[in-house]
Amino acid sequence: MHSEFANRLCIDKDLKYLKGVGDARAKLLASELGMHSCSDLLFYFPGRHVDRSRFYHIRDLYGTEMPYIQIKGRFINFSREGEGRKQRLTATFTDGDRLCQVTWFAKIQTIGNMYRPGVEYVLFGKPAFKYNAWQFVHPEVEVFDPERPPQGLRGIYGLTDTLRKRGFTTRLMQTLVANLLDSIPEGSLPETLPAEIIRERHLVSFDEAIRNMHRPSSMQMLQKAAERLKFEELFYLELHILEFSRKRNLQLKGHIFSKVGPLFNKFYSDVVPFPLTGAQKRVLKEIREDMRTGRQMNRLLQGDVGSGKTLVAFMTMLLAVDNGKQAAMMAPTEILATQHAEALARWAQPLGISTALLTGSTRTAERRRIAQGLADGSIHMLIGTHALIEDSVEFRDLGVAVIDEQHRFGVAQRARLWKKGTVPPHVLVMTATPIPRTLAMTVYGDLDVSVIDELPPGRKPIQTWLRYDDNRNEVYRHLYNEIRKGRQAYVVYPLIQESEKSDLKSAEEGFERLKGLFPGIGVSLVHGKMKPAEKDFQMQKFASGGTSILVATTVIEVGVNVPNASVMIIENAERFGLSQLHQLRGRVGRGAELSYCILMSKRQIGTDTKKRLGIMTETTDGFLISEADLKLRGPGDMEGTQQSGIAFNLKVSNLARDGQIVGQARDAAMRLLDGKMLLLPDSIAILNRELQIRFARSIDWSRIS
């Protein structure tokens, strides 16, 4: 272990002491990439690799854009164009058969003096076809040396604009990494996985993996290196999450709900407004099993908009009341809490169950009445906003807490509900933002996951159209026709006020335009900078039918249920993520009428953006959309993924593309925790060291192995 510790010290030394770095470059790397030590550089892997063993000919290029390639040839001429900061240097380059253009916008004087016509050079960069010619911008250029062996696979490192302006290139990053790897004796990087797992999974060593991620000897070795590091990263993440979850389950005792009582049975047989779907029945069974165990339930309920999560939540709350306990439901906005309270009161009234609503605007006299009812147990169910977690709110015996749209609440807020009794209540958190299972079981590792993946029968799918700015008259005609039928509509904008620097449509500008276009038709405006009381007033006005059009920013993504609304127009839809578009679309289609979601965009949008908007028009399945969103944007961008209390920062793995490895890593972690994988003392030491480094904690593995 001593030599391993010494090597840790070697790669953890300050980056400024590495050959080729120094003080100035070290400060830049620290500020731009958060890179401070040699270890940080070692784990800064290339975003992709290019094959430098092959020379392309210009005639081989195709399409409009190619990957990074290299060609061999000579400069024919150079010319300077423009003045001052707009000055650029342009050159014509030939491979002896065809011509291409090369352009530089920086260091023009230096480059102009560096290269000479007639000398054979190697040009390396990313060509694009523009103005009838292939062009390279700021490529790497070096004199061709016939004695030099081919370079093979080389990594392309991500660089910020500031780094590029200050002289950093892919070539420089490759040199710095090479200097670091050459300073570490081959085979001396300490192992980071137990030998038993390496043998079982036929993984390459940590030393081989690191070296081949930067300078792969072959494409096969690059794949093996990536697989090894992905598995390791996900294995430690899953181990951390599972150990955390199991420890919580052992520590947190919960109420035992031993019976399904008369209230639940009466509701199910006589009151339930529509037959339960198979998915709802399955989820209720999972919840019922949780509540029998004597451990606190912590369950995430995922379900698309309209899948019947609120009904499942109410029946879960009934289980508490049937077992002599109280229940609470917390929602992120006052209007959503009010709508939940109305629905639950309607279902509870035939059962003789008492409900109450508590929000920030509840008057003092009503608060006193609620406080008395909670204390003596005469109020069975309390629905409200953040007001529920105030210290002054005390239950006689809280058995179940339901949290709606959980990504609006942090772990600390969830935990405050736990403290409302001597025994923590069972917790059911709900979300209408479907999350792919590989992500859910990792990000929400402290929660068990239930999924309602079925919509009630008879619900009409929402028609989703993509329309461009020059189709606006057609869209407004459709909007007017729907309003004439007595329907209502949302028009959503990404900004509040118009900005000179942006061509995005403004909510305030749109509000004024729609008032002018539709005289005599009520139009409301809602945005996040309004005072809460004014915002709630306008939303309530729309919800009650007082206005026909609600112009809003994304504050209405969660928090209003208007079954009469049949049109959702989303301006600048290209600026929204898929999951956000899906959430907005879910505001309509809640009644019996056919509903429409119209995505407005400018015509000139990128290929990826067009693909994203195309997905929205092809499917209304939230789980398919969330899978696509995860692949396009990555887990860090998905709303709510940092709410579980489990922090993670994946360097090599991708939860969208590496679902199979996630499963394998989770399986290995579970077998280890279950005592089905026996480890030698050296392996236990490795596990503790790595968990300490990655999560600043260690585990007593001796009790497991």
Image: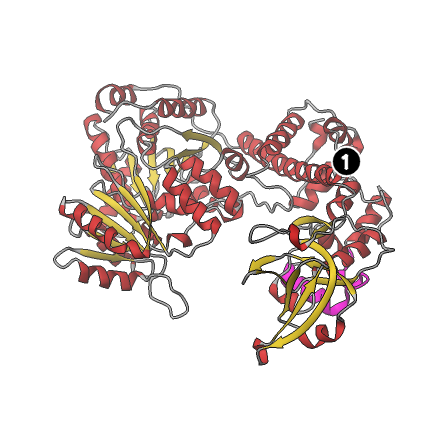
Span highlighted in magenta in the image: 13-33
Q: Percent position (x, y) of residue 205? A: 78, 37
Say which of 46 and 561 sits in front: 46
Q: Percent position (x, y) of residue 629? A: 47, 43
Q: Main secondary structure of the magenta part?
A: helix
Residue at the image position 66 percent from the left and 48 percent from the top: 48
Q: Percent position (x, y) of residue 401? A: 38, 36
In the rendered view, tell whether residue 286 sits above or below residue 564. Answer: above
Rendering quarter of residue 356: top left
Residue extending farthest to the front is: 97
Say which of 671 and 493 sits in front: 493
Question: Quick check: is 67 in the magenta stretch?
Answer: no
- The residue to which callout 1 is attached is 204
* Amino acid type of the residue that numbered disc 1 sits on in the rendered structure: Val
Which quadrant of the figure contains the N terminus? top right
Residue 388 visible: no
Question: Quick check: is 23 in the magenta stretch?
Answer: yes
Rendering quarter of residue 421: top left
Which quadrant of the figure contains the C terminus? top right
Q: Is residue 623 left or right of residue 57?
A: left
Residue at the image position 50 percent from the left and 42 percent from the top: 630
Q: Is residue 184 left or right of residue 331?
A: right
